[in-house]
Image: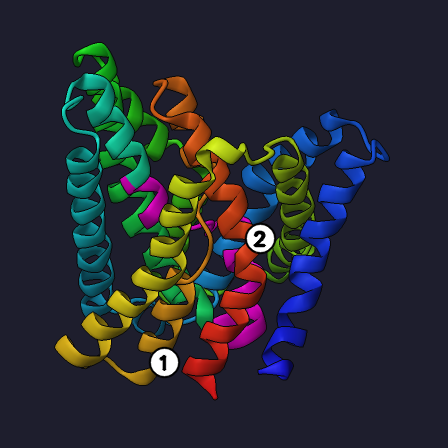
Amino acid sequence: MIAFLLSSLPIFGIVALGWAAIRMQLAPPSLRDALGAFSFRFALPALVFRLIAGQPLGRSFDPIFYVGYLASGGLIFALVFALSLIFDRPACDRQAIAAAAARATTTTVSNLGFLGPPLMLAFFGDHGAGPLAMAILAEVMILLSLGGVIMGVSRHGGGNVAALVIRGTAQNPVVAAIVLGAILAATGLPLPAPIARFLDFLGGSAGPTALFALGGALAARPIDRSTAFTAAGIAAVKLVVCPIFVWYVLAHLLHVEPFWVQAGVLIASLPSAGNVYVLAQRYAADEERVSAAIVLSTAVSVVTVPLAAWLMLH
């Protein structure tokens, strides 16, 4: 257990460094925004594209894993959504529906962009790119889009909300990198050496810049005591229930190979994604509790992620 904790420590150490730098005003908030934009739009897509394109497509993608992982997330989403509406009674109106969708999305969409690549590379090497890519396709393209559509429709009565969410997903640079990398991998053509070196150099900066920006973003989201109880419940579902559910579905219902079980559980154990807060804030969907759950799940994951890795890989 100590070895797995030490393996994760540098990753979460950079998150803590970003948090301290913004909190202690050693760096301006504009640096956090610039690093986040650079990592998301340039470094992370380069890293993901290089990893996916650099290995055979059959080694990166497993349709049974994808179906099992998506089904697990979908069931958790539906369960949290239903429970939120039950506990919010008798206020089961549009605002309650939007809040329930925000909580369900927070419990099922992981921080795959910032924490996913460095952790998967640390524990699985380049082979971890496949499960990570499929998890991104499942969570970002399906679950995050579903949550955004429900939040938008509940708050604004429809309109072009669905189109906006779908267009935003299609324009996601990481999703585009996965699709393009898979196409190149399917052709079997190698990347030219200069392009491969460029992508390696650019993608190598993805982890540190993303983690530092994540820490800076967390510094701007303190936890309000009045929201701590709900946030703790959301974080518990994300960090404990989701990994256990994914493990049961992949290992005992679908009987996929051990590598895919290990990778799926580790991905599911990641804390909630920060972009859920963006949607919740845009649609006024319980954004305070969503923000608190993101901060709390990220802080607690310093212990729970190494524990999940130890349980799966020991």
Asked which colour scheme the image uses, the reply is rainbow
Does the image show residue 179? no
Choose between 236 and 75: the one closer to the eye. 236
Residue appearing at x 42%, y 62% in the figure: 269
Kindly give the residue lying farthest to the right in the view shown.
Answer: 26
Residue 299 badge: 2
Residue at 45% across, 44% down:
273
Spatial separation of the CA atoms under disc 1 and disc 2: 27 Å
237 up-or-down from 93: above or below: below
Residue 12 in the image: state x and y as whole percent. 65, 58
Of 169 and 78, which appears nearest the observer? 78
Label 1 belongs to which residue?
Answer: 259
Residue at position x 82%, y 33% in the image? 27
Residue 18 visible in the picture: yes
**Label 1: how many Cα within 10 Å (few below 14, some 14–19, many 20+):** some
Q: Is residue 115 magenta?
A: yes
Inspect the image, locate mark 1, and give the three-letter code of the amino acid beneath it. Phe
Part of the protein shown in magenta: 104-126
Earlier residue among tags 1 and 2: 1
Whether residue 38 sits left or right of residue 135 in the image: it is: right
1 vs 2, front mark: 2
Q: Picture quarter containing residue 259?
A: bottom left
Q: Quadrant of residue 84?
A: top left
Could you tell whether 135 is left or right of 143 in the image?
right
**Do residues under tags 1 and 2 come within 8 Å of each other at their CB atoms?**
no
The secondary structure type at the circle numbered 1 is helix
